[in-house]
Image (tube, rainbow, N blue to C red):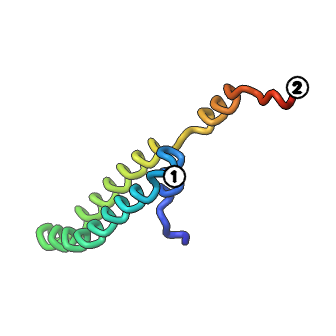
Amino acid sequence: MLARPQVIHYSPARSGRKHFAAIRGNMTFVYMWGSALGPVIAGYLSDQTQSYGAILWAIVATLSVSVLLTALLINPWSDKVEQLSAAPLSSSLS
């Protein structure tokens, strides 16, 4: 449970529950290819450079890009507050 990517919690907020299964399916497709090709590419790079430095820098770069992309998915709390404050009050309260 703790190893689950946090992106799945943000994606329904952006696109709604209607597209949640498609988003999750696309994410799983990308994870599968990353898991299959990652070790092959890492092995090739370590054979060519005789070092793990290039692999580690590639991982750092990939994680940095994913952090930036994830940050773009998150709705800021101030947007939610503005949406709630702009909503009209119910007539049943008066």
Q: Quadrant of residue 52?
A: bottom left
Question: Mark 2 packing: few (<14 Cα in 10 Å), some, or many (20+)?
Answer: few
In the image, is 92 to the left or to the right of 77? right
Quadrant showing the C terminus: top right
The amino acid at mark 2 is Ser
Image spot of residue 34 (x, y percent): 28, 66
In the image, is 59 to the left or to the right of 44? right
Which labelled disc corresponds to residue 94?
Answer: 2
Which of 3 and 9 lies nearest the eye of the viewer?
9
Query: Disc 1 or 2, which lies upstream in sequence?
Result: 1
- Residue under the image location 51 percent in, 52 percent down: 17
Total of numbered circles in the picture?
2
Q: Secondary structure at mark 1?
A: helix
Vertical relation: 16 (above or below) 53: above
- Residue under the image location 31 percent in, 53 percent down: 61
Vertical relation: 6 (above or below) 76: below
Determine the residue located farthest toward the front in the rendered image: 92
Question: Mark 1 packing: few (<14 Cα in 10 Å), some, or many (20+)?
Answer: few
Vertical relation: 67 (above or below) 28: above
- Residue under the image location 49 percent in, 66 percent down: 4
Determine the residue located farthest toward the left in the rendered image: 48
Residue denoted by label 1: 17
In the image, is 88 to the left or to the right of 57? right
Which labelled disc corresponds to residue 93?
Answer: none
